[in-house]
């Protein structure tokens, strides 16, 4: 046990009471010559939030003092939640007046002000900010005669940043900028800052995506030392490396990916054995051979943790020299791989497997569309072109369906949420948005990667090796109880929720398939489950109903895959030595945490670019009519989803034929007088009245068949929602006496924006 661990363990003992630093030194018998190290350790523990120093300068362990350490998740209305480090503790609600200067994503310490009572969540206040998350903020600059302010693109940052006149640095109204915070917010006082970079006018092509990239701290450029290392990597496999590996160049191995994919990191092979079993080969690019541990490439990959797929570009985890070159399993070219051969019987059970270093040469670079045309449409041209592989494709389909059925039988949950395919022109403008079609070829690769990931995870679990697992923990019983209440109101019921099995949820999804309530039940079910993450512990995967699971198949674009490749290779080559094992146990925890956090950021950035392009696409169609389905109902309106996945809001205030009351038990709006009901799953004819790219907000109004909706009605709605927004900010032309007056003006401006 390290000195740091000993100090913390002592302070967490039941008999411990807060002590002054002098008292701790005496009790722990710290020698004079070790005082410097001791004080440094205490500072580290305090900075990490493990301990806290009281106003009386006494030290105690935070959890022993009833405090919560975690991340502050802001809301555009000013309140927020503390997401505890300890995931066994429920999130803590923090009212606006108790945030005390905390901003979205800040690391904080909070204390309870109200316990959980009568089903209401606990409330608390921020008492200390351990680490600020937003040293720079991306937003839109607005100015007046004497001062300016930046409205953050991230709506979870509720306060505008005040900019003194001499810190504009050339910024003009309407431009997207990066502001460096020079003074953090306090109670009743907005943050202050200075403009450090101008990205371009908000309406200029490309500025929108660039703003998202900057907002989420994504980097398209790699550091010089990373580029130098990448450039030093050979474009071809070195001959000296081939004899060290099993040679699979003679096998019929293919990649199957999307038409636009350039980082091909997985390939497959298949054959039917004499005993009737299938021999499935999954061959994954050996990225770890080129990205060596603790090298510049490795450190940058750890920092990024994942590739990010925005609507118009990919921000890769590794430089293109590797991701699209030597690490990509391009056709008819020798490539180094890590292979898993699995012998699978007719029920989908893996009866034998082996994992080893290999060298391959893929026969073809197949696409999802072509494989589907071969298997489903029997396209004559493709059948002739790929005649040497047709039998293999048929075997792949056969095995994939067996594996899929096995997953379903054990209870694996498959959500059917449509994904959008957004097509842009050369200027980055969206010209078409449609549903992304999932075909048999997608399912083949999905099932093969899933069974491979499970096989590898189980192997390493029983090897008792340090590892990074992909986990999905059992759901919180309270959330499932609330979900069951919703189901009851919609005519369904879950049994055995005290010890819920994923098969129960899978069966429910089967019952609601194709019904009006399918979308809302699926959505609330997903929200009731835990989020998948990376962990050094094998906690199982609830959604897949799998005891063992990891991410092994995409080391080009995911850091956990790269880490476990190294561990697997070390394990099968020479075994992991005790000192090395000790190091790896610590490192896999760090890698799991970093990768989970960056995955969330990547998902948010991807969602943000999708939402803005959807709003931009609809902007040119204001006044047009559409048919959609009610996907969600709230107290302020109902969301209508079009067939192309675009979703817009019909506000309650726009329903003028009656007063509508929100029925929260049945997720519906009911007319007080005429008793007309709007509920989830209903088809509606709507007219688009607003599409705001800045807020990502799309607004519809219902076309009333009885009364009709005129162009005047539409114009009135647009006027009501835009005139207030664009009205000059009252008092903006006067120079404030003190910056803390900005908060009230910012609030007024936000009310106008809404």
Image: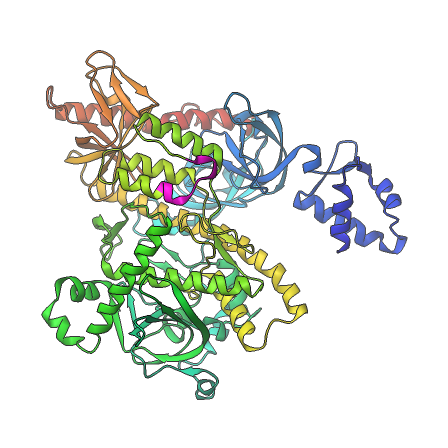
Q: Quadrant of the C terminus?
A: top left
Q: Residue at x 27, y 22 (%)?
A: 669
Q: Would you say residue 502 sits in the magenta stretch? A: yes
In the displayed structure, 25 sits above or below 162; it is below
151 or 238: which is nearer to us? Answer: 238
Frontmost residue, 427 versus 664: 664
Number of marks in picture: 0
What percent of the width, then of the height, locates residue 462?
A: 54, 63
* Coordinates of residue 162 in the picture (x, y in percent): 50, 35
**Residue positioned 43% across, 82% down in the render:** 246
Percent of width and height locating residue 233: 46, 78
Chain part drawn in magenta: 496-505
Is 213 situated above or below 631?
A: below
Q: Is residue 493 left or right of residue 573?
A: left
Up-down: is 596 above or below 186? below
Q: Report which quarter residue 375 is drawn in.
A: bottom left
Q: Residue furthest front?
A: 275
Name the one closer to the observer, 475 or 313. 475
Determine whether, in the image, residue 386 is placed left or right of residue 613.
Answer: left
Q: Residue furthest top?
A: 673
Camera sees residue 405: yes
Closest to the observer, 183 or 667: 667
| Image color mode | rainbow
Q: Tell me if residue 557 can be seen.
A: no
The N terminus: image quadrant: bottom right
| Residue depicted at 50% across the width and 74% down the height | 229
* In the image: residue 371, left or right of residue 542: left
Judged by its main secondary structure, the magenta piece is helix
Q: Position of residue 35 (x, y in %)?
A: 84, 51
**Is residue 487 found inside the magenta-colored segment of the image?**
no
Q: In the picture shown, does residue 291 fall above or below 603?
A: below
Residue 235 in which image quadrant: bottom left
């Amino acid at each position: 046990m390290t000195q740091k661990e000993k100090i913390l363990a002592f302070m967490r003992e039941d008999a411990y009471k807060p002590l002054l630093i002098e008292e701790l030194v005496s009790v722990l018998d710290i020698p004079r010559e070790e005082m410097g190290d001791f004080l440094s350790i205490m500072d580290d523990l305090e900075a990490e939030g493990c301990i806290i120093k009281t106003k009386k300068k006494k030290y105690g362990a935070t959890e022993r003092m009833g405090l919560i350490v975690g991340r502050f998740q802001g809301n555009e209305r000013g309140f927020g939640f503390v997401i505890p480090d300890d995931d066994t503790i429920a999130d803590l609600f923090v009212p606006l007046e108790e945030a005390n200067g905390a901003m979205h994503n800040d690391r904080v310490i909070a204390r309870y002000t109200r316990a959980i009572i009568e089903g209401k969540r606990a409330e608390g206040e921020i008492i200390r900010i351990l680490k600020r998350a937003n040293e720079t903020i991306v937003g839109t600059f607005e100015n007046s005669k004497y001062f300016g302010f930046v409205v953050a693109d991230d709506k979870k940052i509720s306060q505008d940043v005040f900019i003194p006149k001499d810190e504009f640095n050339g910024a003009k109204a309407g431009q997207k900028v990066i502001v460096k915070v020079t003074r953090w917010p306090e109670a009743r006082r907005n943050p202050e800052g200075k403009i450090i970079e101008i990205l371009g006018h908000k309406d200029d092509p490309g500025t929108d995506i660039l703003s998202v990239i900057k907002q989420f701290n994504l980097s398209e450029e790699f550091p010089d030392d990373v580029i130098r290392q990448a450039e030093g990597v050979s474009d071809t496999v070195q001959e000296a490396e081939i004899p060290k590996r099993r040679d699979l160049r003679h096998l019929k191995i293919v990649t199957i990916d999307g038409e636009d994919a350039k980082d091909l990191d997985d390939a497959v092979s298949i054959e039917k054995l004499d005993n009737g079993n299938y021999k499935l080969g999954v061959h994954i690019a050996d990225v770890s051979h080129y990205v060596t541990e603790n090298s510049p490439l490795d450190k940058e990959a750890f920092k990024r943790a994942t590739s990010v797929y925005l609507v118009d570009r990919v921000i890769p985890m590794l430089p293109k020299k590797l991701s699209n070159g030597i690490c990509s399993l391009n056709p008819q070219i020798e490539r180094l791989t890590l292979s898993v051969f699995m012998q699978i019987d007719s029920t989908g059970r893996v009866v034998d497997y082996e994992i080893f270093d290999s060298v391959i040469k893929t026969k073809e670079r197949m696409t999802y569309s072509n494989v589907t045309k071969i298997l489903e449409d029997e396209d004559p041209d493709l059948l002739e072109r790929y005649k040497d592989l047709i039998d293999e494709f048929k075997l792949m389909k056969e095995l994939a369906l067996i594996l899929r059925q096995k997953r379903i039988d054990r209870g694996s949950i498959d959500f059917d949420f449509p994904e959008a395919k957004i097509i842009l022109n050369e200027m980055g403008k969206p010209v078409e948005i449609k549903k992304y079609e999932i075909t048999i070829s997608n399912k083949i690769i999905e099932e093969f990667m899933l069974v491979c990931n499970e096989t590898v995870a189980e192997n390493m679990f029983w090897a008792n090796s340090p590892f990074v697992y992909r986990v999905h923990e059992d759901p919180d019983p309270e959330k499932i109880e609330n979900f069951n209440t919703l189901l009851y109101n919609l005519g369904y019921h879950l049994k055995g929720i005290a010890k819920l099995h994923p098969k129960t949820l899978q069966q429910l999804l089967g019952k609601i398939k194709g019904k009006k309530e399918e979308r809302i039940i699926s959505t609330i079910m997903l929200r009731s489950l835990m989020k998948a993450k990376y962990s050094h512990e094998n906690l199982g995967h609830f959604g897949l109903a799998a005891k063992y699971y990891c991410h092994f198949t995409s080391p080009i674009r995911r850091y956990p895959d790269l880490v476990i490749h190294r561990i697997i290779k070390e394990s099968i080559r020479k075994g992991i030595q005790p000192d090395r094992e000790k190091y790896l146990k610590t490192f896999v925890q760090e890698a799991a945490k970093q990768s989970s956090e960056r995955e969330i950021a990547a998902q948010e950035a991807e969602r943000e670019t999708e939402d803005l392009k959807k709003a931009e696409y609809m902007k040119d169609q204001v006044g047009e009519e559409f048919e959609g389905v009610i996907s969600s109902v709230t107290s302020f309106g109902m969301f209508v989803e079009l067939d192309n996945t675009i979703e817009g809001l019909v506000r309650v205030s726009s329903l003028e034929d009656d007063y509508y009351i929100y029925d929260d038990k049945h997720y519906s709006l009911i007319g007080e007088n005429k008793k007309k009901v709007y509920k989830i799953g209903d088809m509606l004819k709507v007219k688009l009245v607003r599409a705001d790219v800045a807020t990502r907000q799309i607004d519809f109004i219902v076309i009333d068949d009885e009364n009709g909706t005129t162009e005047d009605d539409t114009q009135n709605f647009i006027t009501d929602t835009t005139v207030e927004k664009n009205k000059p900010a009252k008092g903006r032309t006067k120079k404030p006496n003190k910056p803390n007056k900005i908060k009230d003006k910012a609030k007024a401006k936000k009310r106008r924006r809404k």
